[in-house]
Image (cartoon, rainbow, N blue to C red):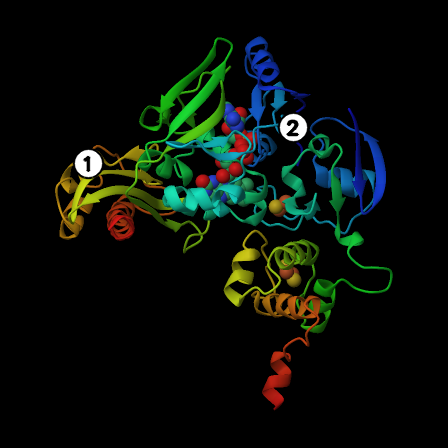
Amino acid sequence: MKVSMTVNGRLVNGDVEPRTLLVHFIREELALTGTHIGCETSYCGACTVHVDGEATKSCTMLAVQAEGASITTIEGMAMGDELHPVQEGFWERHGLQCGYCTPGMIMSGAALIAANPSPTEDEIRHGIEGNLCRCTGYHNIVKSIEYAAAKARGETPPPADWEEAVV
Amino acid sequence: MYPRQFEYVAAGSIEEAVGVLAANPGAKVMSGGMSLIPMMKLRLLSPETVVDIGRVSGLDAIEDKGDYISVGALVRHGAVATSAVIGEHATALGQAASWTGDPQVRNRGTLCGALAHADLAADTPAAALALGMTMVAQGPNGTREIAASDFFVDSLMSALSPDEILVEARIPKRGGGSAYDKLGRRGGHSDYAVAGVASWVAMSDGVVTDCAIGITGVGTKPTLAVGAMEALRGQGPDGIAAAADRALEGITVLEDLYGSEAYKAHLAKVYTRRSLEQAVAAAS
Ligand SMILES: Cc1cc2nc3c(=O)[nH]c(=O)nc-3n(C[C@H](O)[C@H](O)[C@H](O)COP(=O)(O)OP(=O)(O)OC[C@H]3O[C@@H](n4cnc5c(N)ncnc54)[C@H](O)[C@@H]3O)c2cc1C
Ligand code: FES
Ligand code: FES
């Protein structure tokens, strides 16, 4: 089946089997391998992209369902050399270890602060409920998103844990 | 992981989708795909034809119709969870939707899809039972209404026939107060219900004049807790504990990965009490 959609601002066309999952289309047809596949069960969130602005598990959507949609993947987050605030947050607050969950976490974090610019810690934890991380224990991921939210509001992010500890 | 091959039809209207279902026995309708696609990936289900109604316009509204609230086939869990009119008149349903899955699931999964899917541990069916909702099904011969109490037939089986589509769910505005509470599989309110209970009560002079209680997660299907409902009618708030003790009358508790029979029976009573307390507080 013919399918066309906008991915990271670029119009793309494909000819796919109906069973092609959006994540396979993104990774294999478009060679955008930043979007990961971590499970078979729609639980891990490593495949999260934005579909018309909403966080979506791209392993649980058919490519043909995305006909005409506007998709953003992790590759579309930075503006040239300037990282998206959530990317910068993960960098500044050590929001990753192995990095496998990170693209999905960043996409969920970005959708969260777009909808709720001043999330509480509790709201952040619930906001990333659809994303699993097997390394970090989530603490620094939450701190990364707090950093990003402050940055996106034009405020100075709270100091890092390790800076607090020194004081 | 790829599902098996299938033919995909993007329906332009419900009539068209019903026509495809009627002409292709074994075809499946798809709304949000949040249950259908995982089942197809795991090859628990391999329909030859998938009819996607996701693009049919005009089905995504929540409307106040005076004596009932209409929820269209394509209204997502996220929209139900944040709707002011549902929050006011159908609190239990708003809570159940807000605790269904995770943000990504709520962005695509639909209320009608979840009701039609009829998972024995799904959240919104409990609220549908407690709130006395009505399902509007459209098939080749037009539409018919099905009461929630007749809708959940068995595990993953609703009263819809294979060529019918659930086009609307209606919530009567019956006054009173309602609440949903659950223990999720991942703890707190997260994930499917190990035990989940929705309650609706109407009060007058401190006495419960009418009530309905829907239980999910513990038995073979979302079920009305008729024993507890009978016990609570005519009682004040101090009758809640005794009513909750009768929560499991007529329900066969299933042991599963998430709890033994005894544990789930215990949870059902605890969550019946908690949801009744909240519903009574809301109605008072
Ligand atoms: C990670 C994850 C976590 C989840 N957690 C929860 C949870 O905590 N609680 C919970 O209750 N649910 C949970 N779900 C399920 C979720 O609520 C689904 O959205 C819902 O069960 C199905 O809705 P859908 O619109 O996605 O339907 P689909 O997946 O499109 O369809 C599901 C089934 O219903 C049928 N169907 C769909 N729409 C209609 C219709 N209008 N008329 C007739 N038949 C129809 C389909 O043919 C299919 O058999 C979870 C799902 C995932 C992936
Ligand atoms: S790969 Fe999509 S949720 Fe795990
Ligand atoms: S950093 Fe390894 S899974 Fe999250």
Q: Under tag 2, what secondary structure? A: loop
Measuring from the top left, give residue B194's x and y in whole percent: 37, 46
Left or right, B221 with respect to B207, comes to right
Q: Residue at x 25, y 48 (%)?
A: B276
Vertical relation: B16 (above or below) A167: above
Q: Under tag 1, what secondary structure? A: loop
The amino acid at mark 2 is: Arg
Q: Are marks 2 and 1 on the same chain?
A: yes
Pointer 2 indicates a residue of which chain? Answer: B
Q: CA distance from mark 2 to mark 1?
A: 43 Å
Q: Residue at x 78, y 43 (%)?
A: A27
Measuring from the top left, give residue B139's x and y in whole percent: 49, 14
Measuring from the top left, give residue B275's x and y in whole percent: 29, 49
Give the mark nearer the N terminus: 2 vs 1: 2
Left or right, B68 with respect to A72, comes to left
Left or right, B214 with respect to B209, comes to right
Q: Residue at x 55, y 26 (%)?
A: B45
Vertical relation: B16 (above or below) A78: above
Left or right, A52 with respect to B181, comes to right
Q: Which residue is mark 1?
A: B249
Q: Which residue is mark 2?
A: B55
Quarter of the rendering containing residue A29: top right
Q: Quadrant of ligand 2?
A: top right
The residue lying furthest to the bottom in this view is A167
Closer to the camera in the image, B126 or B156: B126
Measuring from the top left, give residue B92's x and y in whole percent: 37, 44
The amino acid at mark 1 is: Glu
Quarter of the rendering containing residue B214: top left
